[in-house]
Amino acid sequence: MKLLNIYQALANRSFHVKSISATLLRLYLAPIFIIAGYSKMNLSNPDINGFNQLFASQDIINWFGNGEWGLGLPFPELLANLAAWTEFFGGWLLLIGLLTRIVSIPLLFTMVVAATTVHLDKGWFAITPTNVDASPAKVLTWLGVEQAEMSLNNSEATRVRLNKMKEILEENGNTDWLYENGNIVVLNNGIEFASTYFIMLLVLIGIGGGRFTSVDYYLYNHWIRTKLENKL
């Protein structure tokens, strides 16, 4: 009974944890979306000035529309600009916690589009694991998932290739300098990051922007006070 009381007391105070979680999720996601939108716009192009900087660059529009080396999407100019604006302005809204639940919905949709059009055919992992025994796919092999076994085979094949790359570098390069900022990996470019951001946004839709650290919290309190004052 005492353990149950402790659990209930912790549950009654869980809103503090929920608020901290919401704040950390916002602060984690905001820079990712801001820079993703920024990179799609003309903001960094010194040859374009004024309001046109806020539109998607021609390179991004071409990538959205080209079916051979791009995404092959219809209405590429419209979709490229919607993606850029959603990510850039949505990221800033997440940062300050304004309209958190609402803005998370279109951001979540951009992650669905990114996962299905850019990353889905690459599988799950963003970076290919090269240690078969440490790969999360190993757990799924215990459950008899055939694709997981294929993933482990791919990891083993990648490990062989990665070791060969390192051998070539050691024979022909200054490895102290080459590895100074980190080891080399094989980019798989799967849906891992897009799926992770999707889940995080889904959580924000459920719990909101958090107490004390979001504009939403103060706007809601102001609305409640105004409503109570009007009733008095």
Image (cartoon, grey):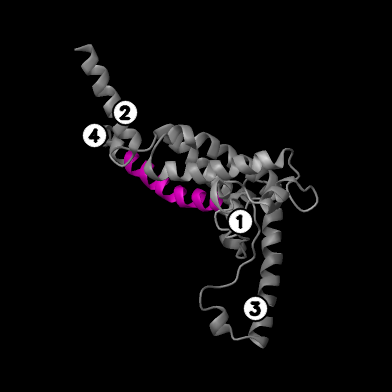
Mark 1 residue crowding within 10 angstroms, few (<14) / some (14–19) / many (20+): some
Which residue is denoted by mark 4 in the rendering? 9
- Mark 3–mark 4 Cα distance, whole angstroms, equals 55 Å
Q: Nearer the viewer, residue 56 or 192?
A: 56
Residue 126 marker: 1
Which residue is denoted by mark 2 in the rendering? 220
Camera-near label (4 vs 1) is: 1
How far across and how far down the image is residue 84, in percent? 58, 45
Which residue is denoted by mark 3 in the rendering? 166
Camera-near label (2 vs 4) is: 2
Name the element at disc 4. Answer: helix
Residue type, mark 2 in image: Tyr
- Mark 4–mark 1 Cα distance, whole angstroms, equals 40 Å
The image quadrant that residue 134 belongs to is: bottom right
How far across and how far down the image is residue 216, in percent? 35, 34
In magenta, the rendered stretch is 18-38
Residue type, mark 4 in image: Ala
Labels 2 & 4 near each other (Cβ < 8 A):
no
Labels 3 & 4 near each other (Cβ < 8 A):
no
Name the residue: 48% across, 36% down.
103
Residue 78 visible, this angle: yes
Q: N-terminal of the two: label 3 or label 1?
A: 1
